[in-house]
Image: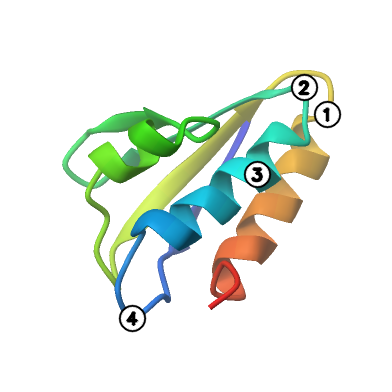
Amino acid sequence: MVSRKVKIVNATGLHLRPAGVLCETAMKYKAKVTFTTDNHYEANAKSVLGVLGACVKAGEEITIICDGEDEATALEDIVNSIESGLGE
């Protein structure tokens, strides 16, 4: 299992479009991908509803957790995607 804390740079946080991009990125990997927020909410990063339910706002930090055979690659790709703004 690997994890890394990352800051949400999108001006509007994880609303529908960036949540979809996050999910698409996570679904490319076999590893289980979740994230936790500072208020201890845990979400499945492969579920748009789970991501939206976390209500992550701009500037908040989340911890991405990947567990499985391609965990390191998944973590790198997801963190890079978040840091680049998730398509926005």
Which tag is nearer the camera, tag 1 or tag 3? 3
Marks 1 and 3, Cα distance to the nearest angstrom? 16 Å
Which element type, helix, strand or loop, lies under badge 1? loop
Q: Give amino acid for label 3.
A: Glu
Marks 1 and 4, Cα distance to the nearest angstrom? 30 Å
Taking the spot 65% from the left edge, 44% from the top edge, the residue there is 24
Which element type, helix, strand or loop, lies under badge 4? loop
Q: Give amino acid for label 4.
A: Ala
Marks 2 and 3, Cα distance to the nearest angstrom? 12 Å
The crowding category of the residue bearing disc 2, from other C-alpha atoms within 10 Å (few below 14, some 14 to 19, many at least 20), is some
Whether residue 85 is visible: yes
Taking the spot 55% from the left edge, 31% from the top edge, the residue there is 46
Taking the spot 47% from the left edge, 30% from the top edge, the residue there is 47
Marks 4 and 2, Cα distance to the nearest angstrom? 30 Å
Name the residue that disc number 4 marks: 11
Horizontal and vertical percent position of residue 14: 36, 59
Which tag is nearer the camera, tag 2 or tag 1? 2
- The disc, 1 or 4, on the residue closer to the chain's N-terminal end is 4
> Label for residue 70?
1
Which tag is nearer the camera, tag 1 or tag 4? 4
Report if the CB atoms under discs 1 and 4 are less than 8 Å apart.
no
Q: Give amino acid for label 1.
A: Asp
Name the residue that disc number 2 marks: 30
- The disc, 4 or 2, on the residue closer to the chain's N-terminal end is 4
Report if the CB atoms under discs 2 and 1 are less than 8 Å apart.
yes
- The answer to whether residue 1 is left or right of residue 28 is left
The crowding category of the residue bearing disc 4, from other C-alpha atoms within 10 Å (few below 14, some 14 to 19, many at least 20), is few
- The disc, 1 or 3, on the residue closer to the chain's N-terminal end is 3
Q: How is the image coloured?
A: rainbow
Name the residue that disc number 3 marks: 24
- The answer to whether residue 40 is left or right of residue 86 is left
